[in-house]
Image: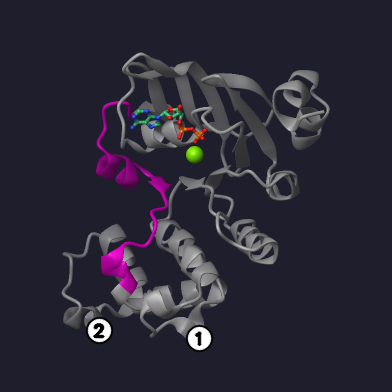
């Protein structure tokens, strides 16, 4: 087990849609600064789990604890303020903005600056400097002033991670961040995710086992609405139940 304190925990998380039991008493633990992959077959409940943790859905039973604090009843916005942040696909609004405009708006939100109009963000000096530094770090500085919708898809996906990371999360939730990317783009994205500072724990759902075993420090395997097994990548690779249920050996 990790010596780091627990940053995110769920206890007995349960959710049904009508008669369909999606999560059945799911217990999950993640430690500070960890990169933690969640894997499992399609329909295992992985995305539903992220929706429950981020507050988009409410469980029928069970708890979500962030650094020991019960946030089960907190709204999604309250969880963001507490440091629990998920990525969102860039929507039509952000698609017309430049990466720099989007990241400055995110930083103003984080810093509690009253939401500035697009014209007024030129006055947000500290946020512009920090935003430019973030874009540079993630290889997006050359694209900083272009409409986001004109960027290659791979870079739009990187920007989604940057916008979430700009909020300085304690826990960053990534649901299939490499979906739709080429193998090389997926590795490039995870190379960047791997540089995120120790203060941010990253939970990611991923199907590509090269990315899972290449970048995760811990792996949890979901099956049938609960955690089948959780451990180091090596432990999961050699776990008989995991091989049978998921890895197809
Ligand atoms: N809003 C919803 N209404 C009804 N069923 C849903 C809803 N969202 C997900 N499900 C069902 O819950 C199960 C788990 O889905 P999901 O969490 O998306 O799985 P995963 O991300 O592991 O592939 C699936 O059977 C899916 O059809
Ligand atoms: Mg999913």
Using the rendered view, name the quadrant where residue 130 is placed: bottom left
- At which x and y percent is residue 127? 34, 73
Checking the image for residue 122, the label placed there is 2
Name above or below for residue 151 compared with residue 187.
below
Residue 206 colored in magenta in the image: no
Task: Mark 1 or mark 2: name the one nearer the start of the chain.
Answer: 2
- At which x and y percent is residue 170? 46, 45
- Image quadrant in which the C terminus is located: top right
In this rendering, would 215 be left or right of 173?
A: right
Name above or below for residue 28 compared with residue 94.
above
Number of disc labels: 2
Real-space CA distance between mark 1 and mark 2, rounded to the nearest whole angstrom = 19 Å
Name the residue nearer the viewer: 170 or 163.
163
In this rendering, would 79 be left or right of 230?
A: left
Q: Secondary structure at mark 1?
A: helix
- At which x and y percent is residue 143? 46, 83
The residue that label 1 is drawn on is 142
Which quadrant does ligand 1 occupy? top left
Residue at coordinates 58% horizontally, 57% vertically from top-left? 196
Q: Are marks 1 and 2 in contact (CB under 8 Å)?
A: no
Residue 87 colored in magenta in the image: yes
Q: Please report the bounds of the magenta region as a residue range.
A: 71-95
Q: Secondary structure at mark 2?
A: helix
Name above or below for residue 8 compared with residue 204.
above
Name the residue nearer the viewer: 129 or 38.
38
Using the rendered view, name the quadrant where residue 167 is placed: bottom left
- Image quadrant in which the N terminus is located: top right
Name above or below for residue 199 compared with residue 5.
below
- The image's colouring method is one colour
């Amino acid at each position: 087990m990790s010596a780091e304190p627990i940053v995110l925990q769920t206890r007995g998380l349960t959710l049904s849609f009508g008669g369909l039991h999606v999560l059945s008493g799911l217990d999950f633990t993640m430690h500070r600064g960890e990169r933690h992959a969640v894997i499992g077959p399609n329909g295992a409940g992985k995305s539903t789990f992220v929706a429950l943790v981020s507050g988009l859905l409410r469980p029928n039973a069970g708890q979500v604890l962030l650094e020991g604090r019960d946030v089960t009843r907190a709204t999604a916005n309250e969880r963001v303020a507490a440091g629990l942040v998920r990525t969102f696909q860039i929507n039509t609004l952000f698609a017309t903005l430049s990466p720099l405009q989007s990241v400055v708006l995110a930083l103003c939100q984080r810093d509690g600056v009253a939401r500035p109009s697009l014209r007024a963000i030129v006055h947000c000096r500290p946020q512009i400097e920090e935003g430019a530094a973030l874009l540079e770090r993630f290889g997006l500085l050359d694209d900083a002033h272009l409409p986001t919708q004109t960027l290659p898809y791979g870079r739009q996906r990187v920007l989604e991670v940057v916008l979430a990371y700009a909020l300085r999360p304690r826990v960053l939730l990534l649901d299939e961040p490499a979906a739709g990317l080429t193998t090389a783009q997926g590795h490039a994205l995870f190379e960047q995710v791997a540089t995120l500072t120790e203060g941010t724990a990253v939970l990611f759902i991923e199907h590509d086992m090269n990315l899972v075993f290449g970048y995760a420090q811990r792996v949890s395997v979901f099956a049938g609405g609960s955690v089948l097994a959780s451990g180091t990548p090596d432990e999961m690779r050699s776990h008989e139940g995991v091989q049978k249920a998921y890895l197809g050996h």
